[in-house]
Image: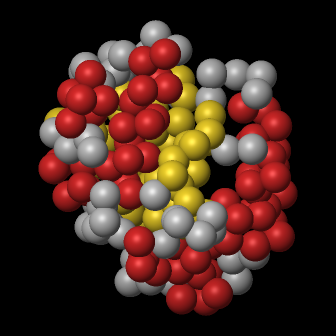
Amino acid sequence: MIVREAKIADAPAIARVNVDTWRTAYRNIVPTDYLAQLSYEKRESNWQEILVNAEKSKNFVCVAENDSGELVGFAAAGCERTGKYVYQGELFAIYILEEYQRQGTGRQLVRTVATKLAELSLNSMLVWVLGDNSAYKFYELLGGEKVDEQQTSRAGVALKEIAYGWKDIAVLINTAV
């Protein structure tokens, strides 16, 4: 698996992974009709905008490619968005196609994100995950401490979000792979 910083040309592949993983990760969490309406084109436009703006900020996107060069996962991160927590950096999103999960790709992406945050002098990190999504176990295995909970809404469904944090991301850089 190759993990690298995303380029604007990656937007279509990131959009595909984003939509496909939403459809698998959230299939029992948000309404099926909402997932069916997700659009590759709209997500591609969103990701193009994110990637263009990332060049002007401390935000960034990393992608994971399989041995054939197919993009199979991505992570987006940058400065913690609310200023409400002691954590300097934030993992905004991480998505990996279902058939590539549980193979170390998530750990590689998190390690790359933590390394990039450290290069930006953002030495702590926060991530929000839906409480009904089994991905929370991944963050716990990586040593994330539960920091906060809040209610949110996705596709008209009230859901619980849980924040996990790392006060020192060196642990992720040194042990995530």
Measuring 45% from the left and 35% from the top, which residue is drawn there?
A: 113
Residue 55, quarter of the rendered image: top right
Residue 176, quarter of the rendered image: top left
> Residue 76: x percent and y percent?
56, 43
> Residue 51: x percent and y percent?
75, 41
> In the rendered view, would you say 8 is above or below 88?
below
> In the rendered view, would you say 40 is above or below 115?
below
Measuring 70% from the left and 83% from the top, which residue is drawn there?
A: 37
Residue 94 is at least partly visible in this image: yes
Q: Is residue 110 left or right of residue 80?
A: left
Q: Residue furthest front?
A: 67
Q: Quadrant of the C terminus?
A: top left
Q: Is residue 118 left or right of residue 132?
A: right
> Residue 167: x percent and y percent?
25, 21
> In the rendered view, would you say 73 is above or below 146?
below
Residue 156 is at least partly visible in this image: no
> In the rendered view, would you say 24 is above or below 86?
below
Measuring 36% from the left and 16% from the top, which residue is drawn there?
A: 123
Q: Is residue 115 left or right of residue 42?
A: left
> Residue 104: x percent and y percent?
31, 58
Measuring 20% from the left and 44% from the top, which residue is drawn there?
A: 142
- Asked whether 58 or 86 is in front, the reply is 58
